[in-house]
Amino acid sequence: MSRKCPITGKGPMSGKNVSHSMRHTCRRWNVNLQTTTITDANGNKKRIRVSAAALRTLRKNNAKAAAKAAETSAAE
């Protein structure tokens, strides 16, 4: 299982640690992947690993969709 977000495409980055004596050692910054369950249009649940930023966006968009659905049902 790779450390890559399927939604945003974010992957690990590499760089160097620099100590006080300016000694450089290689290191790797991993993506903040979180396991979450999503429901598709058919109602099927699926577990995926997404980045924390993508999870925030998914929750925000789902909240907007729910508010819009409540608004249209209240108008009827």
Image (cartoon, helix red, strand yellow):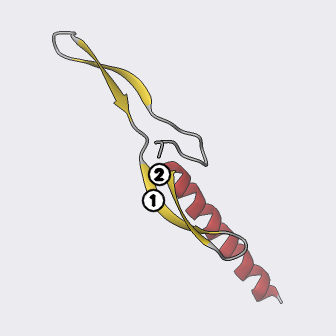
Q: How many marks?
A: 2
The x and y percentages for residue 28 are 36, 29
Q: Residue at x 44, y 29 (%)?
A: 13
Q: Which mark is residue 35?
A: 1
Q: Mark 1, mark 2: which one is toward the viewer?
A: 1
The x and y percentages for residue 8 are 60, 44
Q: Residue at x 52, y 57 (%)?
A: 55
Callout 2 amino acid? Ala
Q: CA distance from mark 1 to mark 2?
A: 10 Å
In which quadrant will I find the C terminus? bottom right
Outermost front residue: 1
61 in relation to 17, above or below: below
76 in relation to 19, above or below: below
Q: Residue at x 66, y 67 (%)?
A: 64
Q: Residues within 10 Å of mark 2 (few under 14, many from 20)?
A: some
Q: Indicate left or right for 65 with 37 as reference.
A: right
Q: Nearer the viewer, residue 18 or 1?
A: 1
Outermost top residue: 22
